[in-house]
Image: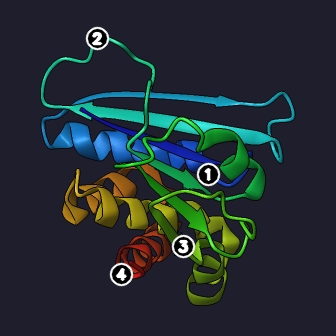
Amino acid sequence: MKQLRLSGSGGQGVITAAIIFAEAAMSEGRQVVQSQSYGPEARGGASKAEVIIDDAPIYHPKIIKPDIVLSLTQKAADKYYKDLDNAAGLLVVDEDLVPNVPVFANVIKVPVTRIASEQVGKMLFTNIVALGVLVKLSKLISFESAEMSVKGRVPIHTVEQNIKALKLGYDAV
């Protein structure tokens, strides 16, 4: 069983990224549970989305100890990394938006928002850049499955930019 937590602020698209990841895993025949929560502020408040993936049935729908935590903001990093396994867990942060990276054994810093803004053209694609990073680091789903799931989930007129964002995130690590 692998457990992923995607976190950021409302409006950054972490929930959409988690749904796309879960759909890609399902398309590969895996068992998947996806859940989300966000603060009462919604847009701008802390949000998280979680994905559990296994080859066997999943009987507990909540994450106990995440294997990977992605944090796109300082607030999310501070709030959601604490139950990561310090020996085997992986903390992935947006290096520009998480200036004070929590002290943790395994940290990967990626300029996710900067890549979306400068190379795709809009910060709107931050979540898909982050998705590409997670696809590469987690090795849980294929790039092709993620690509198909993105194509099925995003507005048709943004497919090309979203696939570019996915590839840029994948290649950033």
Q: Say if mark 4 contacts mark 2, CB within 8 Å.
A: no
Q: Distance between the Cα atoms at labels 4 and 2?
A: 34 Å
Rendered location of residue 167, percent (x, y): 37, 77
Q: Which residue is mark 3?
A: 109
Q: Secondary structure at mark 2?
A: loop
Q: Which residue is mark 1?
A: 13
Give the numbered dot on residue 171: 4
101 is higher (above) or lower (below) than 117: above
Name the mark nearer the viewer: 4 or 3.
3
Q: Secondary structure at mark 3?
A: strand
Rendered location of residue 143, percent (x, y): 24, 65
Q: Distance between the Cα atoms at labels 1 and 3?
A: 19 Å
Rendered location of residue 138, percent (x, y): 30, 56
Q: Say if mark 4 contacts mark 3, CB within 8 Å.
A: no
Residue at the limit of the structure toward the top, as seen here: 59
Of callouts 2 and 1, which one flags the residue occurring earlier in the amino acid sequence? 1
Residue type, numbered disc 4: Asp
Of callouts 3 and 2, which one flags the residue occurring earlier in the amino acid sequence? 2
Residue sitting at x 58%, y 63%: 93
Q: Secondary structure at mark 1?
A: loop
Q: Say if mark 3 contacts mark 2, CB within 8 Å.
A: no
Q: Secondary structure at mark 4?
A: helix
Give the numbered dot on residue 59: 2
Q: Say if mark 2 contacts mark 1, CB within 8 Å.
A: no
Q: Say if mark 4 contacts mark 1, CB within 8 Å.
A: no
Query: In the shown orientation, is residue 14 left or right of residue 163?
Result: right
Viewer-closest of 132 and 79: 79
